[in-house]
Amino acid sequence: MVFSSTGNYYDANAIAYFPPPLKQIQEGVKPTNVTCTEGLELILKQSNGQPACVKPSSVAKLIERGCFC
């Protein structure tokens, strides 16, 4: 654990977490600027431009199905 100057601590090995894409959009983030939690990739739905954070292994499968680009 590492202590910050404010006295709070955090785990230096923790995975970076970000809110789900729809929550980020509700907070005013543009779909192309959504940040995914570490280990996930941002893709945009081809039909309406909506973002999704998916595992890298899912990206190719979704593209093959024409769901995302």
Image (tube, rainbow, N blue to C red):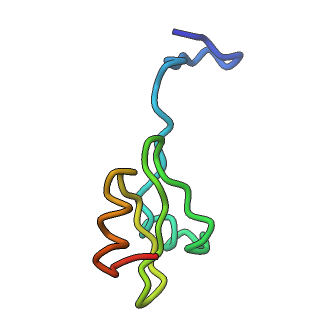
39 sits left or right of 57 in the view: right
Q: Name the residue rendered at 46%, 72% in the picture.
A: 51
Q: Position of residue 15 (x, y in %)?
A: 46, 31
Foreground pick, 48 / 11: 48
Q: Position of residue 69 (x, y in %)?
A: 46, 76
Q: Position of residue 49 (x, y in %)?
A: 48, 83
Q: Nearer the viewer, residue 57 or 5?
A: 57
Figure check: 57 above or below 8: below
Numbered label tally: 0
Instruction: Name the residue: 61% across, 74% down.
Output: 30
Residue at image position (49%, 19%) is 13
**Most extreme residue toward the right, as rendered?**
5
| Name of the residue lying farthest toward the front | 64
Residue at the farthest bottom position: 47
Which residue is painted at 49% across and 61% down in the image? 42
In the rendered view, would you say 23 is above or below 54? below
Taking 4 as reference, is 69 left or right? Answer: left
Q: Nearer the viewer, residue 51 or 28?
A: 51
Q: Is residue 24 left or right of residue 63?
A: right
Q: Quadrant of residue 39?
A: top left
Indicate whether 40 appears above or below 6.
below
Q: Position of residue 35 (x, y in %)?
A: 55, 56
